[in-house]
Image (cartoon, rainbow, N blue to C red):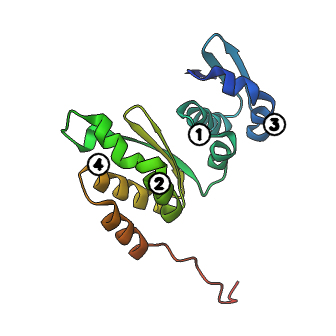
Amino acid sequence: MKTIISEKIARIIKNKKKLQEKLKVKITNRGKEVFITGKPENEYIAEKVIDALNFGFPYSSAMLIKSDEFEFEILNIKDYTKRKDLHRVRARIIGKGGRTLKTLTQLTKCYLEIKDNYIGIIGSPEQIKNAQNAIIAIIQGAKQSNVYKSLEKTQIKPLSDLGLK
């Protein structure tokens, strides 16, 4: 049985039935504490999904973690800069009208969310690595256009089926 302290308990309660069915666990709560019971591997996945929901991801994005191709990572902005004006750093990542964040999402094919000084990323491991490198570059002061250019160069090409299967 795992216990998670949830800030966004309403979001979990709203999706409780769906979460229990899809993740094959039993979810109970007392106040802000969420209890997960089930098989250990199901508990682990449920914990990751609930962490993603707590972080601010929508239900549809958080449920992608259930599949083997997707993972959930959190970056701390403070780990990559010594600047004190973190609101400026967050603003660089978000961009004017959210454009930078939207462009990063499209180029990396990852789902990105910002909460306080943390950035949540949901995607495949290779794509997460690209997204992390891009975000770290922006945090450290690289121009957005240069980051986009490098992302376009390192774009992961889909494997073409050669009919060998």
Task: Compare residues 24 and 87 and report the one nearer the observer.
Answer: 87
Q: Classify 10 Å Cα crowding around label 4: few (below 14), some (14-19), many (20 and above).
A: many
| Horizontal arrangement in the rendering, residue 42 relative to residue 121 (left or right) | right
Mark nearest the camera among 1 and 2 is 2
Q: Position of residue 163 (x, y in %)?
A: 70, 89
Residue depicted at 42% across the width and 57% down the height = 131
Task: Compare residues 132 and 146 and report the one nearer the observer.
Answer: 146
Mark nearest the camera among 4 and 3 is 4
Q: Quick one: SS at disc 2?
A: helix
Q: Quadrant of residue 38?
A: top right
Label located before the other in sequence (4 or 3) = 3
Q: Position of residue 28 (x, y in %)?
A: 72, 18
Label located before the other in sequence (1 or 4) = 1
Q: Are marks 1 and 4 in contact (CB under 8 Å)?
A: no
How many angstroms separate mark 4 from mark 3 (CA)? 39 Å
Residue depicted at 73% across the width and 39% down the height = 23
Q: Classify 10 Å Cα crowding around label 1: few (below 14), some (14-19), many (20 and above).
A: many
Per the image, the residue denoted by label 2 is 99
Per the image, the residue denoted by label 4 is 139
Q: Quick one: SS at disc 3?
A: helix
How many angstroms separate mark 3 from mark 2 (CA)? 36 Å
Per the image, the residue denoted by label 1 is 57
Q: Quadrant of the C terminus?
A: bottom right
